[in-house]
Amino acid sequence: MAPNLATPIAELKGVLKRQASALRAAGVATVGDLLACYPNRYEDFTSHLPLASVKPGSQVTVAARIVSARNRKSFRRRLTITEAAIEDDSGEMVAIWFNQPYLAQSLKPGAEFRFAGKAVKTKFGVRLANPLYEPIGGGNGLVRPLMPVYPLVGGLSQFAMRKLAAACKEAIGAISDPLPPALRKANGLVGKAEAVRGAHFPETLEERDAARRRLAFDEVLALQLSIGRTKRLRGAKRAVRVPFDEEGTKAFVRSLPFTLTDDQRKAAWAALKDMAKDSPMHRLLDGDVGSGKTAVAAVAMVNAAKAGFQSALMAPTEILARQHFETFKRFFAGQGIGIALWTNNYRRSAADGKEIECAAKKEIEALRGAIAAGEVAAVIGTHALVEEKLRFSSLAFAAIDEQHRFGVRTRQLLCTKSGIPGVEPHLLSMTATPIPRSLALTAFGDLDLSILREKPKGRQEIATFVLGPRAKAQAYARIREEVAAGRQAFVICPLIDPSDTLGVESVAEAYERLRKDEFPGIAMAMLHGKMPADEKERVMADLVDGKVSVLVSTSVVEVGVDVPNATVMCIEGAERFGLSQLHQFRGRVGRGAHRSVCFLLPSAPSPAVDERLSAMTTHADGFALAEKDLELRGPGDLLGVAQSGRPALAMASLADLDLIAAARDAAATLLDGDPDLARHPALRAFLAAEIEDAHLE
Ligand code: ADP
Ligand code: MG
């Protein structure tokens, strides 16, 4: 039977059980889901260049015969290099691959292949580095003029993804088009089914581009519709006016142990002005790690307290909430503001220098009662803040730290907790992911934006080095030195699943290797996303307490947690991360008095990788790196969409300002005539699915 859109992947012909379950775990269960995994890009086999005219530094496709192929070990023996001498009628060249020794056997002398990759100059001459290759006239039916390159969903290989897409091809015809035909025509867009076919199986560059434009339009339209609806709905919401107490605010700012930066001042001022209105503030505070977002939230909290209202600060983990509680204890000392910590495991109150730990049931109930009675002015906590039983009497302001770590639902729940009928708290969402302004306005267009670009004075620059495989030892030696001097270090690894064989070791493998070979006798711990939350918290707490000297972690390592004693950030497989993400990791160190360093250790070095990573050595500004990321990799990374396994093909066009303008106009027209999209059920359903998937709301 031919597959339809609802057919489970597991029922397709030729699919391995392992593959089907890996895909299911990544949220790809049906043929329809798989067809929605658009390729990120394409290898272009449509035109060939004679070998003699290949210029180093360019991306090329060539058709050539294999002369010979062999494997050799690199100097440090960690890397296997496959070299194939290839020729055509114009000349010859060498193609090289890293850590794919099995390749040498498939590259039989005399056989003809197409290669697509980057030509690079080495001291041995021009090399074709890590090219894609396909036998000419190869019998697997998968060789096409434009080879899709899929996002790595569930660790499946490109080959497997292409085969699966081919197996789903027949179902494409049944895809319905959510766009009204008139709208499609007005914007010169191809139909949805045609676009999906064109994305997976383009015959020409034109087909591919038309598909990309249509799919991008859909995504941007969904975003604009959702922003437009949120804004329209919000128009009806009410908040309490919190008068701006200029004297009180100034006195508090003077009492801080530092002078606010201009950006902090502007952001705080904007928030206070928003809060003086009777419609709820929805402001995004975007500032690099260490830019001082907490102090901005504190100013708003003090202002609310002076006007007799409560405020809340919600952090994604207990450890962060506890660090914030300690900070606010210091900030609010002498302000006469009572504060509380409220998480699942810690409940505490502090006022006028007196601190009470609430462990027994009775004590917890007493604190709950004090919050409900409005006796506690500022409550700091985790998602435990939104629990049913916790009530506020007059919550006028809420700040959400690392807002992207919370689901839409948690954020909405917090907005229902003001305790005043018909009133929502003013909301300040904070993020440490620097987002270029153009992108922020699109993706977070329903929020007002404050950016902290300027760093507080006296911040040290973190010396950053890119070290090839041969120089790795330097990084480990530095870690040993720092640990001997009483400092701590992070080692970040990109993957946790050993079956994802991209030549990059898993965090467990890295941990074992480092423990045995590099750091014997040093207290180490491991952290990854599959660990239960409380175990993760415990490991982070051990690090903060100095019980762990070297933490080997995946990218889950907490963004906001302060470990002032950590001085080395070492990132394995650095080429697999976006610049923004690398910058975030780097922000984990350099938070104390000691000089700190960051080592980037690419596992598959290449001139292109070196060039990209070198931006880290020259830029200390997260926003500059984010702009570079946007240019090089599209916005997926920046918005945290890449992690969800969602492909970046259409996302890439979020940077396309003309397309955004067209989609925004279309959204406004649609909503003006039909605010609930009642007359466009297909579009409404698409919107629901799209927005839920993309985690952008
Ligand atoms: P983040 O934006 O990453 O949340 P924090 O609010 O944690 O940054 O601030 C980082 C550190 O900088 C804290 O120790 C804080 O007290 C300090 N800090 C904040 N603002 C300033 C400032 N204007 N001058 C000096 N230090 C500051
Ligand atoms: Mg913070």
Image: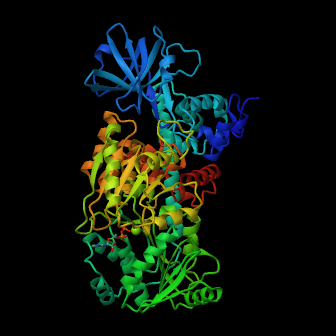
How many numbered tags mark residues here? 0
Quadrant in the picture for residue 305: bottom left
Quarter of the picture holding the N terminus: top right
Instruction: Determine whether 633 is above or below 451 in the image.
Output: above
Is residue 188 at all visible to an observer of this figure? no
Q: Residue at x 31, y 67 (%)?
A: 592
The image shows residue 292 at horizontal and vertical percentages of 33, 70
Estimate the x, y position of residue 236 in percent, counting from the top left.
53, 73
- Residue 475 in percent (x, y) is at 33, 48
Q: Position of residue 433 (x, y in %)?
A: 40, 58
Q: Which is more toward the observer, 149 or 276?
A: 149
Q: Does the image show residue 654?
A: yes
Q: Could you tell whether 118 is left or right of 381 in the image?
A: left
In the rendered image, the residue lying farthest to the right is: 1
> Which residue is outermost to the front?
521
User: Residue at point 59% right, 66% down?
Assistant: 409
Residue closest to the far left: 458
The one of 333 and 466 positioned closer to us in this rendering: 466
Task: Tell me the colour scheme of the image.
Answer: rainbow
Judged from the image, the quadrant occupied by ligand 1 is bottom left
Task: From the viewer's side, name the closer residue of 52 and 588.
Answer: 588
